[in-house]
Amino acid sequence: MPDFYEINAREYFEATARIDPSSFLTPFTETLGQGSVLDIGCGSGRDLRWLKQRGFDVVGFERSPKLAALAREHAGCPVIEGDFLTFDFSSLEFDALILVGALVHLDRTMLPVVLNRVVQALSGTGLLYMTLKEGEGVRPGKDGRSFTLWQPQELETVFSSTGLQILSFSRQMSKLTETDVWLSYLLRLGPE
């Protein structure tokens, strides 16, 4: 199947680039304080731009070349093109990672695998902020995409198995659709 984000890069950019991420990124930045951040699945570059404007050293990571180009232009930041299922994250070193909606299409069994891969980019006991959609099972979208839905108890088990400690948790209504609820987690790798 052709990649939705590559085919619809401009439309996706227009739908997401101007959403204000303050409500979910402010708690993350307050905990981090300062440092370097890798935005995995950076999409439109919205969060890259917001973080850069607040003095963070940010780099994006995006699978779609067209979205990566739009993110570079929008945020004025470097964006690595790659797939989180195959990229060697151990070659990078960041104080924190964000995965805002980046793993919503990932098969349930692959979440621990991907988390174990991406945390290799963290220096020491770095921070990880991620959001996933709440619900049960897998929901097909009208546009051909499918979304894996999660319950907090399931995610807590995955986090524990991958050495991630939950620092904070919240639920937020989607800024794009009235029916989606996002589960937001601020996590730390390793012991406190």
Image (tube, grey):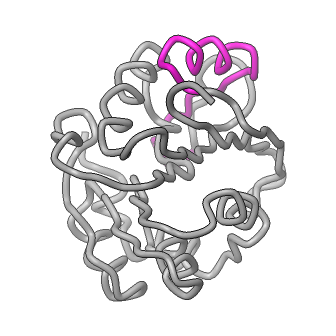
- The answer to whether 24 is drawn above or below residue 152 in the figure is below
The quadrant of the rendering that contains the C terminus is top right
**Looking at the picture, how far across and down is residue 179, in whole percent?**
81, 45
Residue at 79% across / 43% down in the picture?
181
In the rendered structure, does residue 156 fall within the stretch colored magenta?
yes
The quadrant of the rendering that contains the N terminus is top left
Left/right placement of residue 12 relative to residue 110 reads right
Residue at 55% across / 78% down in the picture?
17
Task: Report the number of numbered marks.
Answer: 0
Q: Which of 97 and 136 is in front in this view?
A: 97
Q: Residue 73, located in which quarter of the rendered image?
A: bottom left
- The answer to whether 185 is drawn above or below residue 177 in the figure is above
Left/right placement of residue 53 relative to residue 144 reads right
**Looking at the picture, how far across and down is residue 59, in whole percent?**
34, 68
In the rendered structure, does residue 124 fall within the stretch colored magenta?
no
**Looking at the picture, how far across and down is residue 57, in whole percent?**
41, 75
Q: What stretch is highlighted in magenta?
A: 142-164
**Looking at the picture, how far across and down is residue 85, in whole percent?**
25, 33
Left/right placement of residue 178 relative to residue 42 reads right
